[in-house]
Image: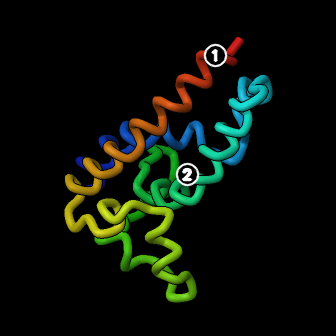
């Protein structure tokens, strides 16, 4: 399963993870005015999802591990309130029972976010 879904999932998620990674990209230091608040809002809103999605990314140099079991909602520790998780992570991602459905939900969620980051990057990347 990893051989089939791992690379596909990595291809979908990589652009999103590149933007929400805790280490800011060099161009982010150039963002000014209202755009600075927009960037901060984007990062704050979507950063929580990054560690969840990283569990599905495959790196050929990392120790092999199994893909997480679906649906993702069942993988959270009980100390995190379900309402808090559902407020941040779309239900389509949380409740996907098949990897194809999960990839489609992640793509639908991440692509518009990546497009917003891309606009800011185009404006401030020098």
The residue to which callout 1 is attached is: 123
**Where residue 25 sits: x, y (%)?**
70, 31
Q: Residue at x 61, y 22 (%)?
A: 121
The one of 68 and 22 positioned closer to us in this rendering: 22
The one of 90 and 9 positioned closer to us in this rendering: 90
Q: Is residue 3 visible?
A: no
Q: Secondary structure at mark 2?
A: helix
> Which residue occupies the extreme top position in the image?
126
Q: Residue at x 75, y 26 (%)?
A: 31
Quadrant that contains the C terminus: top right
The residue to which callout 2 is attached is: 46
Q: As drawn, is 57 to the left or to the right of 125?
A: left
Q: How is the image coloured?
A: rainbow
The one of 36 and 34 positioned closer to us in this rendering: 34
Q: How many C-alpha atoms fall within 10 Å of the one at disc 2: few (<14), some, or many (≥20)?
A: some
**Where residue 49 sits: x, y (%)?**
51, 57
Q: Is residue 58 visible?
A: yes
Q: As drawn, is 28 to the left or to the right of 99?
A: right
The one of 83 and 26 positioned closer to us in this rendering: 83
Above or below: residue 41 compared with residue 98: above
**Where residue 103 sits: x, y (%)?**
28, 50
């Amino acid at each position: 399963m990893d051989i089939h879904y791992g690379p596909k999932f990595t291809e979908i998620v990589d652009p999103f993870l590149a933007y929400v990674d805790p280490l800011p990209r060099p161009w982010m230091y150039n963002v000014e005015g209202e755009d600075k608040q927009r960037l901060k809002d984007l990062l704050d809103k979507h950063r929580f999802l990054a560690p969840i999605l990283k569990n599905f990314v495959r790196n050929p140099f990392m120790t092999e591990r199994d893909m997480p079991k679906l649906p993702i909602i069942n993988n959270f520790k009980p100390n995190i309130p379900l309402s808090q998780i559902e407020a941040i992570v779309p239900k389509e991602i949380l409740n996907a029972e098949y990897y194809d459905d999960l990839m489609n939900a992640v793509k639908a969620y991440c692509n518009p976010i990546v497009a917003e980051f891309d606009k800011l990057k185009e404006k401030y990347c020098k």
